[in-house]
Image (cartoon, rainbow, N blue to C red):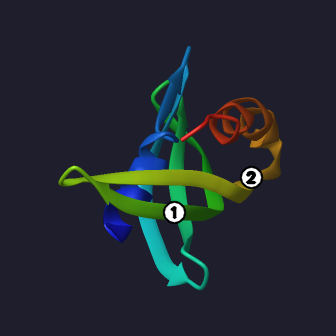
């Protein structure tokens, strides 16, 4: 279930917008107390099909699962997120695209 939660959250962050796109290159995650997952992933940001920047996002995701009528129902919520981009000049991309990603509801 842990892998499914992290994969679901990360897929929300692979974006394409006009001449820019971001794709995940690495993900690490660990189970925390209180049904939370800490996940960090790195993205390669491309502009006009050329490498533009590298982004990093750290998330805390809460999850609760219950079984109802032989089906697993999962309640997944984003608790916190932090984003950074290298080089800093790419911060406009960070503020625009990442803000869109972090405001989505899981």
Which one is in front, 99 or 17? 99
Please give left or right for residue 91 compared with residue 63 in the image. right
For the N terminus, give its image quadrant: bottom left
Q: How many marks?
A: 2
Q: Nearer the observer, disc 2 or disc 1?
A: 1
How far from the left and from the top, in percent, is residue 88? 81, 50
The earlier-in-sequence mark between 2 and 1 is 1
Query: Residue tagged by mark 2?
Result: 87
Does residue 24 show up? no
Residue 59, relative to residue 48: is it above or below? below
Which one is in front, 100 or 1? 1
State the separation of the CA atoms marked 2 and 1.
33 Å
Q: Residue at x 46, y 73 (%)?
A: 28
**Which residue sits furthest top?**
18
In which quadrant of the rendered view does residue 86 lie?
bottom right
Q: Residue at x 50, y 48 (%)?
A: 44
| Residue at disc 1, secondary structure | strand
Which one is in front, 67 or 7? 67
Q: Residue at x 63, y 59 (%)?
A: 56
Q: Which mark is residue 78?
A: none
How far from the left and from the top, in percent, is residue 61? 59, 62
**Which residue sits furthest bottom?**
33
Which one is in front, 80 or 86? 80
Query: Residue tagged by mark 1?
Result: 63
**Which residue sits furthest front?**
69
């Amino acid at each position: 279930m842990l892998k499914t939660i992290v994969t679901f959250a990360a897929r929300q962050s692979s974006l394409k917008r006009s001449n820019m796109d971001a794709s995940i290159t690495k993900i690490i995650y660990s189970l925390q107390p209180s049904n939370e997952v800490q996940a960090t992933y790195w993205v390669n940001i491309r502009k006009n099909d050329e490498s533009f920047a590298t982004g990093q996002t750290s998330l805390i995701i809460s999850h609760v699962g219950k079984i109802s009528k032989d089906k697993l129902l999962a309640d997944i919520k984003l608790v916190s997120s932090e984003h950074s981009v290298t080089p800093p000049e790419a911060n406009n991309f960070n503020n625009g695209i990442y803000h869109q990603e972090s405001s989505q509801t899981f």
